[in-house]
Amino acid sequence: MKFRIIVLAQVLLTGLAVHAAEQIDGARAATNSLLSSWFAVQTNLQTWSADFIQTRAFKSLTQPLTATGQVWFAEPNRFRWELGQPPQSIAVRAPNDLLIFYPRLKRVERFPLNDQRRGQWKDALSLLEAGFPRSEAELLTRFRLLSQSVSNEVCSLTLQPKSAAARRLMPQIRIEFTTNTLELCATELRFADGSSMRNDFQNGKLNPTLPTNLFNPAIEEGYKIVQPIKE
């Protein structure tokens, strides 16, 4: 279950990071030239892709775990994460579902984004949806901007979900972008058990042409389709 929540959360965080430039605290942006410049750049964003290095830290391990992967984004809220080379897991936000593929196991997990059931999965899916706000007001009803700092040409924004249920899963998230090129360079999730997951992005491309089927992957014959939210 924790792994599934991590996958949900990393998709959320990319959405939040990409859209935050347009929708975090407008008053702060108006008085901060750096954020104002970042906001302006984001208005031209239609698609985005990047390689990433993922680092996961656990209290029980002396050394963090690392993996590499790729991520793609398209307006308004489509994402695809591939972790590992070749991919060990593929997370895709389809129009009405989040699909997580496990190629080695020939298994697909399906999370309906309009599911109204209660419980931890509903909280996780709500947190996912919060990453795609339609307005500044919508974002600010769900997140608090805890801090903003600049160091070594990187601006860091720390956010906290306002929902108590969301904070029980992930009490804090961080977004980092460069001050010279205004590019997204890292995101970090901090979980309630003290573990964390950081994604450092490389080779980012703004508005690349993406394959039309990238966010509508076919489920190959032989794959088992499960819906964990019902388990």
Image: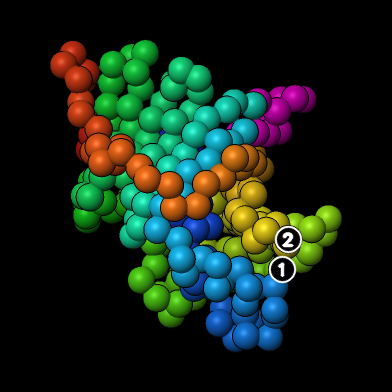
Q: Nearer the viewer, residue 119 or 28?
A: 28
**Disc 2 versus disc 1: distance between alpha carbons?**
17 Å
Circles 2 and 1: CB atoms closer than 8 Å: no
Numbered circle sitting on residue 180: 2
The residue that mark 1 highlights is 148
First in sequence: mark 2 or mark 1? Answer: 1
Q: Relative to 76, say whether 109 is above or below.
A: above
Q: Relative to 157, say whether 208 is above or below.
A: above
Residue 122 falls left or right of residue 73: left
Image point 35% across, 22% down: which residue? 102
Query: Toward which corner of the image does residue 126 lie, by quadrant?
Result: bottom left
Residue 151: % across, % down: 82, 59
- Quarter of the picture holding the N terminus: top left
Image point 58% across, 63% down: which residue? 160
Residue 200 falls left or right of residue 166: right
Residue 68: % across, % down: 57, 28
Q: Residues within 10 Å of mark 1 (few under 14, many from 20)?
A: some
Q: Residues within 10 Å of mark 2 (few under 14, many from 20)?
A: few
SS at mark 1?
Answer: strand
Residue 21: % across, % down: 54, 68
Is residue 54 visible from the viewing direction of this image?
yes
Q: Nearer the viewer, residue 153 or 66?
A: 153
- The residue stretch that appears in magenta: 54-65
Image point 40% across, 58% down: which residue? 46
Identity, as a three-letter code, of the amino acid under mark 2: Asn
SS at mark 2?
Answer: loop
